[in-house]
Image: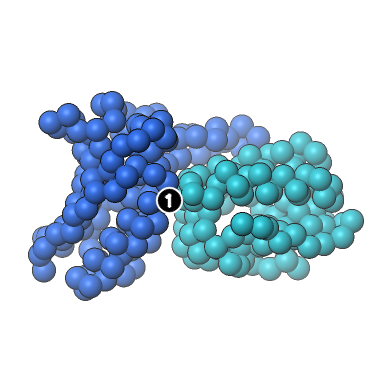
Amino acid sequence: MAGRFAFTVDAAIENIPVVADGIEDYLVSAGVNPAIVPDIELAVDEVMTNIITHGFRRQAGTIGITCSIGEGVVRIEIRDRAPAFNPLLLKEPDISVKLEDRPVGGLGIYLVRKVMDAVSYEYRDGENVLTLEKKIPE
Amino acid sequence: MTLEITGDNEMAVVMMPKRMDAENAPVLEEDLKALMRWNSPIVIMDFSATDYIASAGLRVLLVTTRNLMKGGTKTALISLSPQVLRVFDMAGFTQIFSIHATKEEALKKLQSSG
């Protein structure tokens, strides 16, 4: 099964569920095991939230998304022209501390790494490019 | 979004929304402040309608629960769906929140912990 699904949206929080629904429709129509859809939705949500709130600081911008399937893997590339920033360099939150001391931030990218099998970042042609990969279960 | 909160002097039960994400987190955080004004010794957060939570939703829970704790209120979370529980687990939230299947179970636990 091949093919790809690409689109561009305004960098706005309300567009996140729209993108998630679009990806879900594409994956389901491609016959991908639906068990992995919630993890993919969460990862895309967290990445877009970071781009909108930290990358563009809620100012105008666009986010490009390309979703493809091949070699047993769903691959999602998320691109933006906000200032160069590698979210994978963020310090992982310490999730072992008690409630009173838990920091309130830093969980988003941590969850992305947890639910995806591979996450990579590159700055290419003036764009931040984050690539998420999720293996499709048999 | 308007949160439904029911209860009495002893306890407040709040129905959490269907989605807890960056889109509704600011409104949710504001709406949950009503629990502080309710001022009951126990707050039960009912997740039976919640099918999706992202880090923005987790953050709201952390802030709200911490504020309730400071005011001496005990909190418990009930009826988490498998997907919501999975996200809690990954974030380490199952360690820091009191999570139960039912309201009765939660009350038993909270009341026995003094």
| In front of the other: A68 or B105 | A68
Determine which quarter of the picture holds residue A130: top left
Above or below — where is B45 with respect to A33?
A: above
Colour scheme of the picture: by chain
Q: Tell me which chain appears cyan.
A: B
Query: Which color was chain A given?
Result: blue
Residue A121 seen in this snapshot: no
Other-residue count near label 1 (Cα within 10 Å), few / some / many at <14 / 14–19 / ≥20: few
* Residue lying furthest front: A60
**Residue B68 placed where, x, y %?**
74, 42
Residue A66 seen in this snapshot: yes
The residue depicted at 33 percent of the width and 50 percent of the height is A44
How many numbered callouts? 1
**Residue A49 placed where, x, y %?**
40, 42
Taking A110 as reference, is B68 left or right?
A: right
The residue depicted at 24 percent of the width and 49 percent of the height is A8
| In front of the other: A26 or B9 | A26
Determine which quarter of the picture holds residue A131: top left
| In front of the other: B11 or B95 | B11
Taking A116 as reference, is A124 left or right?
A: left
**Residue A93 placed where, x, y %?**
46, 34
Mark 1 falls on what kind of element? helix
The residue depicted at 55 percent of the width and 35 percent of the height is A104
Callout 1: chain: A
- The amino acid on which the numbered mark 1 sits, given as a three-letter code, is Glu
Taking A50 as reference, is B21 left or right?
A: right
Quadrant, the N terminus of chain B: bottom right
**Residue B66 placed where, x, y %?**
68, 39
The residue depicted at 43 percent of the width and 50 percent of the height is A14
Pointer 1 residue:
A14
